[in-house]
Structure formats: structure tokens, C-alpha cells
Image (tube, rainbow, N blue to C red):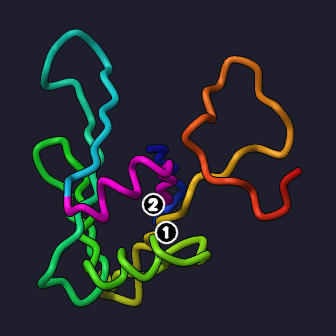
Amino acid sequence: MKLRIRGNSLRFRLTRGEVARLLAKDRVSESVHFSSATADMLTYSLEACEHATQPSAHFGNGEILVNVPTQLVESWANTNQVGIEYTQPLGEGRGLQIVIEKDFLCLQPRPGEDQSDNFTHPQGP
């Protein structure tokens, strides 16, 4: 899973296997280690949630956790829909944009990057 953070937006890209795990209601997580200390780690996770009515992001104890309604995960995973987008209200006219997308094969080969589990690109070869 890839995470891109830019301003007040979080963009997740998931491989086929990660989408299947999310669909099976397993938490999908990755971590970035900044040193050998356990506390110097950022974890980012997605989880399908039966009771959620819209995606929601939470941050605590070094983890970004996004809960996604199970129904949204199912319709996204089982169709050609590329992504799920939602802006979480933060108050005072601000919002956090949450985007969850299928990770496609790159149109240009990237040496050294394993793309074997990526989705076929809609404009691909």
C-alpha cells in the first residue's frame, strides 16, 4: 500500500491483494520506520467497518487509521471503479480529503519496482 500526504489530503493506493484483504475485512497496514526505536514509526492503516456511514480518518499513537464503510469497499472492489473519495469535515470550513484507489501498472516500466500485484491499467498495453 502506498500513502501520499499532501496538504490536507491522504491518498492511498492498494494492490489487488490488499484490496482482497480489505474486502475480507482484514486491516491493511504499512509502517515507516525513522530509526531503530519502536516509537519512531508511523503506521498507516485501512479497515472496512460495518457501522461506518462514510470514510473517516483518525490519528493516534503514531497511526493513521481510516475506517471505510464495508458497503463502499464491496462496491469499489467488485467493479471497475478506480477510487473512493470523501472529504472529512474538520470544522471552521476545513476538510481532510481521503482518497483510496486501486494501484495500476505504470504505463512506463520502472526498473526495480515490483508491480506483479498491481491492477491492469485501463489505458494499458
Residue 97 x, y percent position in the rendering: 46, 73
Write the residue at 45% across / 60% down.
10
Q: Is residue 18 magenta?
A: yes
Name the element at disc 2: strand
Write the residue at 86% across / 38% down.
108
From the viewer's side, name the closer residue of 14 and 35.
14
Q: Do the residues labelled 1 and 2 touch (CB within 8 Å)?
A: yes
Residue 103 x, y percent position in the rendering: 59, 52
Classify residue 24 as left or right of residue 123. left
Residue 102 x, y percent position in the rendering: 55, 60
Q: Could you say which quadrant of the image residue 39 lies in?
A: top left
Q: Residues within 10 Å of mark 2 (few under 14, many from 20)?
A: some
Q: How crowded is mark 1: few (under 14 residues within 10 Å), some or many (20 or more)?
A: some
Q: In this picture, which residue range is highlighted in magenta?
A: 10-25
Write the residue at 30% across / 59% down.
22
From the viewer's side, name the closer residue of 67 and 61.
67
From the viewer's side, name the closer residue of 22 and 10.
22
Residue type, label 1: Val
Residue 62 x, y percent position in the rendering: 18, 41
Query: Dot 2 corresponds to which residue?
Result: 10
Write the residue at 12% across / 84% down.
51
Is 85 located above or below residue 18 in the figure?
Answer: below
Label 1, label 2: how many angstroms apart (C-alpha)?
A: 6 Å
Q: Is residue 125 magenta?
A: no
Classify residue 6 as left or right of residue 122. left
Classify residue 4 as left or right of residue 46. right
Query: Dot 1 corresponds to which residue?
Result: 99
If you read the primary sequence from the N terminus, does the residue marked by circle 1 or circle 2 appear first?
Answer: 2
Residue type, label 2: Leu
Is 45 located above or below residue 38 in the figure?
Answer: below
